[in-house]
Image (cartoon, rainbow, N blue to C red):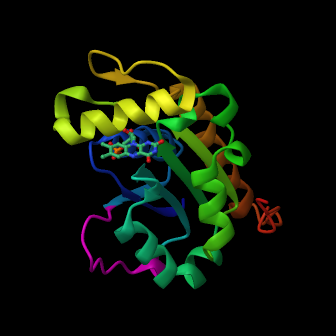
Amino acid sequence: MSKVAMLFASREGQTQKIVERMRLIVTRAGHEVDLIHLEGPVTKVRLEHYDAFVLGSSVRYGRHHDYFCRFVEQNTTVLNSKPCYFFSVNLTARKANRSEPHQNSYLTKYLRYGSLRPDSVEVFAGAFKLSRYGFFQKQLLSLILKVSDGTAAPSEDREFTDWCRVIRFAERFVQQLGDEARGCQRHISKQLVYA
Ligand SMILES: Cc1cc2nc3c(=O)[nH]c(=O)nc-3n(C[C@H](O)[C@H](O)[C@H](O)COP(=O)(O)O)c2cc1C
């Protein structure tokens, strides 16, 4: 059994919903999971107590959350030294030609300019939560949807997340934990380079 930390940053709850779905799959496979919400400037987490990590953040105003980025940069040595999966959640990823990690510029830029070297990465389309937005946010989100594929903003809350894809990502992670336990060599894409 491995001890896993799932560290995430979420504002309207979609990234949290995704890690909770992943936790279910990973715990069912017999592993112990702690969910850690990175929502403040100082989050003391004893990462050395964990065997593997899942990291996830949503995108707001073109960037992953500051608290999340800062935490990752302060802890890259330990995060890079163990199995580590990273995913990004954004609305642009709902577009077919932005839905793969190498096509999603939020993800590619994050990896290119940051020091995190995950074993595996994913991008998930997030949710449009009209009922939770103020006036300014509604305008901004409508603009993002329009600019990215010319569609009008939905008139109600709408979830774009592909849950089968979330499950596959979690299963891949479980598979890697199993490989680690059997002493298989880590076949890492640490050299993942996103041009
Ligand atoms: C204020 C605001 C800014 C956002 N900015 C972006 C953006 O720049 N690009 C994008 O693709 N999605 C953007 N989104 C969409 C979010 O990434 C999406 O709604 C996601 O599901 C939010 O996840 P969370 O609930 O875990 O925070 C934005 C959403 C809000 C509310």
Query: In the image, what residue occupies the spot 45% across and 78% down?
Result: 47
| Quadrant assignment for the N terminus | bottom right
Query: In the image, what residue occupies the spot 29% across and 35% down?
Result: 139
Q: Is residue 117 visible?
A: no
* Residue 78 vertical placement versus 132 (above, below): below
Q: Taking 181 as reference, is 164 left or right?
A: left
Q: Taking 100 as reference, is 14 left or right?
A: left
Q: Is residue 87 magenta?
A: no
Q: Position of residue 19 (x, y in %)?
A: 42, 46
Query: In the image, what residue occupies the spot 45% across and 59% down?
Result: 64
Q: Position of residue 160 (x, y in %)?
A: 46, 25
- Most foreground residue, 87 or 131: 131
Q: Position of residue 39 (x, y in %)?
A: 26, 64
- The stretch of residues the image draws in magenta is 37-49
Find residue 15 and report its image quarter: top left
Q: Position of residue 45 (x, y in %)?
A: 35, 77
